[in-house]
Amino acid sequence: MTELAAGLQERAGIDPDLFVRKTASGEARLDLVVAGMHCAGCLRKVEGALNKLEGVTHARANLSTKRVAVRWDPARLRAARVVRVLADTGFTAVPFDPKLVGTFDENETRFLLRSLGVAGFAAANVMLVSVSVWWGLVTDMDETTRAFFHWVSALIALPAVAYAGQPFFRSALKALRSKQMNMDVPIALAVILATTMSLVQTIVNARHVYFDASVTLLFFLLIGRYLDVQARAKACSAAENLLGLRATAATLIAPDGTQRSVAVESLEPGMKVLVAAGARVPADGEVMSGLSDIDTSLVTGESTPERVEPGMNVFAGTLNIGAPLTVRVTKRDDESLLSEIVRLMEAAEQGRARYVRIADRAARFYSPAVHVMAAATLALWFALGAHWETALTNAIAVLIITCPCALGLAVPVVQVVATGRLTRQGVLVKAADGLERLAQADTIVFDKTGTLTLGRPHLVNGDEIAGADMGLGAALAAASRHPLALALAAKGKGHALPKLDDIREVPGMGMEAMLEGEPVRLGNAGFADAEASAAHGGSELWLRRGGAAPVCFRFEDTVRPGARGAIAALKARGFAVELLSGDREPAVRKLAGELGLDEWRAAARPDAKIARLEELAAKGRKVVMIGDGLNDAPALRAAHVSISPADAADVSQTAADFIFQGAKLDPVVETVDVARQSQRLVFQNFALAIGYNMFAVPLAVAGYVTPLVAAIAMSSSSIIVIVNSLRLNRKAKEAQ
């Protein structure tokens, strides 16, 4: 039994009412795991069954995570009824368990890979045998030898078709049970009929068998299916990865002063917890005692740690990098800012789960047409008085020659070529439909820190500082791991460093030491008895020796090389470009001016970024979000398409559709170009596939095409599509 099956079985007997939550409006809400959802048809079936229930006000399924969120009036419906309706529809549903998320596609991917290997092996060997038979038909091969070769083909093809065809057979059977049609129905029917026909022909020792058509068709289509499932698995819910930032346990301080470890879920407002240095804050709360530095990039996106002191708020998931803190809990675990970000991401995921690819939309009309033509061909030849074998052979030829192989490969082959080209340029394509959505985009929204900048501060006023002060500041900074101190220490390596005594770090304030009997301090403005500069957009460190005037070291983030040129190139391609950052206004204003960005917004938290993207979407804009911080993850999910740098937070990389490597933004421009070229090639491939069918189908209906010729013609159409897709690589070489 697989891990998924075991998990579902374990939770199947749990009362779903125990997992129901109340919304702010008083409705009941339940998150379910539905393992049987595999396609857009399944998704529509699940949502349709739930929306028909009296009292249900909202039902939204997420295909990538296999989750369903349901809201209803608790006075009119019970959770058990919701689960029972899904069971009656053919889907097993259990209350959501985070441990099960991410396991759904794993087994399917492994099975598809094994099926692909089996189909490839069978196709290669059956084709070798078929070539021998074809050659023998025009030479001197006798009937006994030909029969032997046919049986060899049957022994290879029959078990291969039975095993490798299961992904299509199961999908087709499920579609038929739900009274729907998909692309797998004609595929499954053609493979079964061709294989059965070939077996009959082998038994009667006919001149032609069509095992090669069956296994070759399976091999080509399994390639596309495997690529699609693998891409979907990589794009699994980023919200679940974000939950990994949450502390699993908290050190609770009892009223009598004793300490014990408790689960974060058990924390209630008013409780006191101890947050050790290097640990994550377990819950949203207020600092009661202690001074420290907190990595707040989860909230602000700013890489510079923030000093916290008694009376200031801290948030769950942020990292305490200074000294121990005592924190009073103000919010429960499910009400924390981290949980809110997770909910934002899940809402964004659910909103995009209904996206349907071009090939799937075309297949809704294509598949029924295939069966109608095949049935009409069978009836036509019967009406003309043909033998059943002739009529069935012509019908099979129609099914094979019109099988949507070229249609099915039109998108994935372009994706493979485009992905290879982008990989060579340092871009990872994660979403199966990312290129398609990027080609539709018309607006690009950049985050600041770590995206337009590198997130590495550097000293900008070093030339204004005396050598002795530079050396003294570098000597103090060398004893600290603070990002600004590291930048100052690196800048001061070429200066003479004085010998300091009694060096110590004051958490949340800075460094202090003794030099020739005088106190020396390096830290924030208050620590050095100085007045901070409000006009400076970057960060500052202040140095004071004894009673001397304080010296200010000013830092700014490093702008990505070629950022201005990349933004200009994007504008030249018709994009509206703007900056949306959680950083302070002076820093954002200055960077926007340097890069030629007229539209910018500062101090934008995760919910504000979501709101801005929704505002743009309401205006009909298709937005590309480019960000790297944890606070950007919900916006990356909510955007029409998203891009993240390779050094971004893991959650942002998971949420993004594309990841680019290197310090420059040139890969972003390259990705846009490839997406637009890919879209043109996809449309060309569809045109080629449709044109091929308009030419080939009448010939098959008229009986001029055997199943063997149909398989060759079908394969040829696929080769034409592949060759056309390979032009994308030639365009890359021409661009170089």
Image (cartoon, helix red, strand yellow):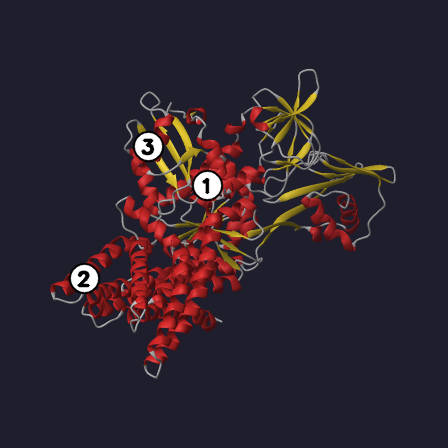
Give the distance between the C-alpha atoms of the residues marked 1 and 2, in whole angstroms: 59 Å
Residue 26 location (% of width, % of height): 38, 22
Residue 568 location (% of width, % of height): 46, 59
Q: Nearer the viewer, mark 3 or mark 1?
A: 3
Kindly state the secondary structure of the residue where label 1 is placed. Answer: helix
Question: Which amino acid is tagged 3?
Answer: Val
Give left or right: position of 604 versus 698: right
Which residue appears at 30% of the width and 26% of the height?
Answer: 55
Residue 67 can be seen in this image: yes
Q: Along the line of sight, which residue is nearer the eye, 108 or 352? A: 108
Query: Where is 642 relative to 62, above or below?
Result: below
Question: Which amino acid is tagged 2?
Answer: Leu
Give the distance between the C-alpha atoms of the residues marked 3 and 1, in whole angstroms: 38 Å
Of pointers 2 and 3, the one earlier in the residue sequence? 3
Which residue corresponds to mark 1?
609
Question: Which amino acid is tagged 1?
Answer: Lys
For the residue carrying disc 2, how many other residues have a C-alpha within 10 Å: few (<14), some (14-19), or many (20+)? many
Give left or right: position of 499 versus 35: right
Which residue corresponds to mark 3?
85
Give the distance between the C-alpha atoms of the residues marked 2 and 3, in whole angstroms: 40 Å
Residue 631 location (% of width, % of height): 52, 41
Of pointers 1 and 2, the one earlier in the residue sequence? 2
Which residue appears at 52% of the width and 46% of the height?
Answer: 652
Query: Where is 601 relative to 366, above or below?
Result: above
For the residue carrying disc 3, how many other residues have a C-alpha within 10 Å: few (<14), some (14-19), or many (20+)? some
Kindly state the secondary structure of the residue where label 3 is placed. Answer: helix
Q: Nearer the viewer, mark 1 or mark 2?
A: 2
Of pointers 3 and 1, the one earlier in the residue sequence? 3
